[in-house]
Amino acid sequence: MKADGIGAAAHRLGGIGRVTGHQQYLADIRLADMLHVKLVKLDCARARIVSVDKSAAEQVPGVRLIMTADDLPQPVPRFGPQFQDRPILADGETKYHGEPVAAVAADTKEAAEEAARLVVVEHEVLEGGVFSVADALDPGAPLVQDPSIRADDQWARTNILREHRFGWGDVDAQEADLVIENLYEFPMVTHFAIEPHGFMAAPDGEGIAVWSTIQHPYLLQKTIGKLLKLPLSKVRVFAPDPGGGFGGKQNPKLEPLVAYIALHTGRPARLVLTLEETFQAVRRASAEVTVRTGLNSDGTLVFEDFECNFLIGAYVDIADRVVTKGSYLAAGPYRVPAVRIVARGILSHTTPSTAFRGFGIPQVTWARESNLDEGARALGIDRLEIRLHNLAEKGEEFVPGDTPADGHWVQSVQRAAELIGWDQPLAPGRGRGIALGLKSGPTTGLSYSTVRLLADGSVLVFSGTSDMGQGARTVFAQIASQELGVPLDRISVVMGDSSVVPYDQQTSASRSSVLMGTAVFNACLDIRNKLTALIAARFEVPESDISIEGGVVRIPDVEMTITEALQAGLGPLGGELVGNGEMRKDKDPSHPLGGSAAFFEFNTTAIELEVDPGTGEITILRHITVGDVGTALNPLQVAGQDEGAAIMGLGHTLMEHYIFDEDGRIRNLGAIDYRIPTSMDLPLQMRSDSIENADGPGPYGVKGISEGALLAVSPAVGSAVTEATGLIIRDLPLTPQRVWEAMTERA
Amino acid sequence: MKTFEYARPSTVAEAVALLEQHGPDAELLAGGTDLVIEMRNAWKVPKVVIDLKRIDELRPAIRENGQWISISSTTVMTDIAEDARIQKYFPALVESAVVVGSVQIRARATLAGNICNGSPAADTAPPLLIYRAVVAIAGPAGRHKIPIDDFIVGPGKVALGRGELVTGIELPIPRQPIGAAYTRLTRRRGTDLASITLCCSVEEGGVARIAYGSVGPRAVLVEDSSGVLADPGAPDERKSEILDEVFADASPSLRSMRASPDYRRAMLRVLGARALQTAIDRFGDAS
Ligand SMILES: Cc1cc2nc3c(=O)[nH]c(=O)nc-3n(C[C@H](O)[C@H](O)[C@H](O)COP(=O)(O)OP(=O)(O)OC[C@H]3O[C@@H](n4cnc5c(N)ncnc54)[C@H](O)[C@@H]3O)c2cc1C
């Protein structure tokens, strides 16, 4: 069964279509009579909108609607996954560079673009925009969020959205031989999915149909239903497989606007963002993390004390959750007797931040792991040694009250050390680094799946997961193949239509193999049970005498394929067997995160590099990434996810960052001056490996895997740079110029 | 993008006539790797786009007559980089052509377009200055040639009058040994616009020439005939003093996001010294 089932390096379902351009992305879908939408934006961050003059734009042939906040129900409807704070269009004031003020809908894209340029928005740029943590905390700073949005909240009259406190033990009572305290900064970066974000809507009978490049179609369905006061059954969401999401496509953004335009005009409407607009729509929260690490002289961690300030942007989106989930595990995979964490989400006049692969963990990991290295250096202890010394063992409740360590993490650390040759002599001018990353998987979850075994023995799997390139379709088909003994080429996975596919909570937090995987597994089990009942009746044998294994059905004296058994069982009318499966992880209101970790994603990253002493340029010679995956359902896809995540981590480590001017405009909008790694920027050698002990909670012992390889890239690189140059840099990215400046300052 | 008219002349004369007729309302299209982006961003809004790619006279792409190599204005970077004659005589031009954009860009981007676009960061400008290239121009008043140093004027500006276009770029085949090297500073190794472009040559008689760009309105050429730079044995301090003079005219942008002025100035020295060393080594191999 290895060829198609669990553990097979099966090729991607739909992979050929994806790479040959045959896959239908949202922007490839054409509806008859469709309007094209273009946003009207101001070239400034914070401004008061005085008036909007549509007259010149309305003259452009083909323009059908110019929508402003005044054309919407009043007060302007707001929405959001955590706070109902994001208006459909800017409401009296723009709060970040690029916030949509109006939208033009026209018969052609060109007409919409031209008209959008001609809409005159009279506005007054407001002084005192909040663009940094320091700006936001200044007592004289304007409030980014209207206090009425959280009227009873103690923080409503500040730019702090919320302050969270976690921890255990008494940090102040601990005595340490060495205390190291530093501030680490993590830049604002954007997801840069290759497929642009796109949204379409069309009136659909008494309801509405909405298309989106979204990761959470069922959240979108709920959001639209609530805004338009429609029952869920009248909101049909189509979610064609996205071309990359990385968290940026999780939550609804401009779908409500396009839905209002469609209803207003009675015509289908479509908006596809440019890359520049995408920068203004989604980003990762930047962070300033101060960490105090207390160590004994033998390297034992005594306490960790964190202050994490995340700059989250103008609207909350899912950022408060990023703040809590990112900081709750700040102390990492270590045994630490006392931990104090203060974490704040701080509002600012910048692009709203959202979920992004790693979900707050990379920011904090950069600080914790780098500071641990400073401690190790000060104590003269090897950086690998200090990690192994403090690492939690399997089963250890390293975060009191939470899921105990769910893997033999030491194996991953040792494998990475071995692969990088940690104990081998280092060539002159080179440096190595090793760092650990830990992220909790989902804390709640709800996934349903339906599997249909059709009369000819082929299979349809229904799953509400979004396959945005991570390969969910393939893995679900492999599970069905394993359980029903059907080859992959006879299985289709149906996704992306809320009227056809049952509910799934979301595609995030590396959850789908574990949660939806279990639902698919259970649906297959349901089919096997039904088949057993059919066979028992048809052959008049007790159910206990029937076994189904690897696609073969056995009853005493008879052996047949599942298809034969099915056809015999169904009789001359044919038909099919329908199985349903569910996986639920309920809320735990007593837990600070609303639930314990379903599993942990644990990763060790090891780097060897050299630094050009003249230019400051870093060359990564070797990049090792080892995850604790439970079971690799598909090793090829595990390697693909690891490599992608590792390279994405190199982006924010080496080159990616938003650059702002004094007025909060993003200066490097687009691909020319916002640099992401290309194939030529990759490490000269990259290797991913997995530790498999089948100790995860999903089917076959699987854990989630898609974020791990990103978590610890920055501190591993930073540590190696320090070893190569003697320099300590605590601000990312480590661009050649920044490294050169550090070298020059020292000289 | 705003709609425009599209013309595809089949002779240079036709193209010149169209250009003369439409003046500033017209834009020439070669590979389009600059023009299309400028039009998309509405920095240029031509009423007429004149495509040069179907003009027979502009083929074959690369010709040699014993004294000159001429590269027609529709020749793309890929063809330049793969041409054995250019590899032999003008290796530093090849080094600059192979770093322009990416594989896809190099298959479209022309050498003439790179120069005519007038970007201070154009990768091929420094080697063309070093190799004493001459630009062949056709216009309403007929044809003429001018040295590349006079052709490049400033950001977005080249020495073309109304109705004029470039038919080719011509390079004199060096009669004496020359060692040359091209290098640049970028923020990453893949596709990037350079923060410094720099080409060095070392020639007979101890002459060293350095052309550099992206640190001022246009790429500039400086010649050192003191013999110091070209001398492998000259003391570092002496070289350093002369390099100070060579780069004295650099005026890197204060507002650039790509590199700070301090970093650019410092890197001119680092890259300059490295390229010079390569040029000296190559000169040694050539002579
Ligand atoms: C992704 C990307 C990466 C890039 N990377 C680099 C890089 O690394 N280095 C670099 O130097 N450039 C780079 N460029 C810029 C561009 O590719 C080059 O400048 C290219 O050589 C331009 O040539 P073209 O044939 O495409 O010119 P076009 O875009 O067709 O024309 C450019 C300009 O020159 C004019 N023009 C063209 N031909 C003639 C002629 N015969 N006579 C008179 N005027 C003419 C046009 O009217 C236009 O104004 C990059 C561009 C892109 C899109």
Image: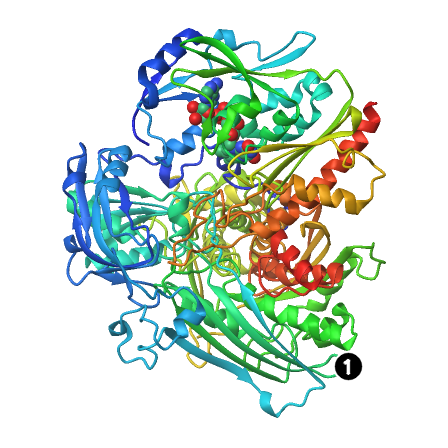
Spot the residue most to the front. B226
Letter of the chain that mark 1 sits on in the rendering = A
Question: Which quadrant, please, contains the N terminus of chain B?
Answer: top left
Q: Quadrant of residue B284?
A: top right
> Which sits in the foreground, A95 or A15?
A95
Q: Does the rendering let one see residue A642? A: no
Would you place residue A686 above or below residue A165 in this image?
A: above
Q: Quadrant of residue B168?
A: top right
Disc 1: which residue: A298
- Image location of residue A214, percent across then percent down: 38, 51
Compared across the picture, whether A480 is left or right of A348 comes to right
Q: Secondary structure at mark 1?
A: loop
> Which sits in the foreground, A27 or A466?
A27
- Image location of residue A254, percent across then percent down: 30, 52
- Image location of residue A512, percent across then percent down: 49, 57
Q: Does the rendering let one see residue B248? A: yes
